[in-house]
Structure formats: C-alpha cells, structure tokens
Amino acid sequence: MSSEGIDSESKVSGNQANIPARIRRELDIDDGDTLRWNIEDDGTLRVQVVQRRKGTFSDFDGYDGGQETDATSEHDAWGVDIE
C-alpha cells in the first residue's frame, strides 16, 4: 500500500485504535457517538458515524405540562386528535 493516499494513521493497542483528531473534527465525532463497521465484498472497510445527539428525539423539547393526562388509560392516544 502506498502512503500517498493515506489521510491519517493510528496504531492498534490492546484491540483498540484511536481516531486521529483531524478525522474526529472533520466528521464531528464526539464522546458517545457510535461507529458502525462493515467489510465490503472487495475487502474495503467502511465506517459509518452515528451521532448520538442527532437521534430520533434530538429536537424534542419535552412535555411542558400544559395538558393534564391519565397515563393509565390515555398513554396510547395522548397527542392524537380524535374527531
């Protein structure tokens, strides 16, 4: 392998490898993010960054308490307008 196409390198130590700072910054990788590893048919290693802070509820501000609910009987229908 030629070193011409290498962006960064890191060594494996105790079955762990560091992600170089330049790559962490460029991909906005932070503590708690997940790396998904996949080996392609041609042997290429593909890594996908799954950012924890951009999950399903990242924009959810929470319930402000303005409407009283009965969680025992209404939990499946809360927030659904039934006409």
Image: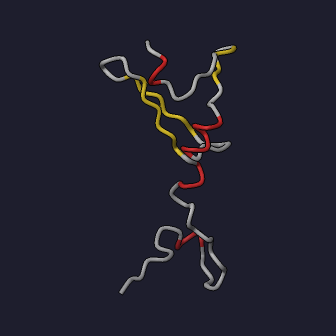
Q: Position of residue 6 (x, y in %)?
A: 49, 24
Q: Nearer the viewer, residue 74 or 63?
A: 63
In the image: residue 83, left or right of residue 52: left
Q: Nearer the viewer, residue 11 or 8?
A: 8
Q: Position of residue 42 (x, y in %)?
A: 31, 18
Quarter of the N terminus within the rendering: top left
Q: Nearer the viewer, residue 47 or 73?
A: 47
Location of residue 57 with respect to 82 vertically, above or below: above
| Residue at the image position 51 percent from the left and 40 percent from the top | 49
For residue 35, what is the image quadrant?
A: top right
| Residue at the image position 63 percent from the left and 16 percent from the top | 12
Colour scheme of the picture: secondary structure
Q: How many marks?
A: 0
Q: Position of residue 13 (x, y in %)?
A: 68, 15
| Residue at the image position 61 percent from the left and 71 percent from the top | 61
In the image: residue 12, left or right of residue 46: right
Location of residue 33 with respect to 45 vertically, above or below: below
| Residue at the image position 57 percent from the left and 68 percent from the top | 60
For residue 11, what is the image quadrant?
A: top right
In the image: residue 50, left or right of residue 29: left
Q: Nearer the viewer, residue 46 or 82?
A: 46
Q: Position of residue 55 (x, y in %)?
A: 53, 54
Give the residue furthest to the left.
41
For residue 18, what is the image quadrant?
A: top right
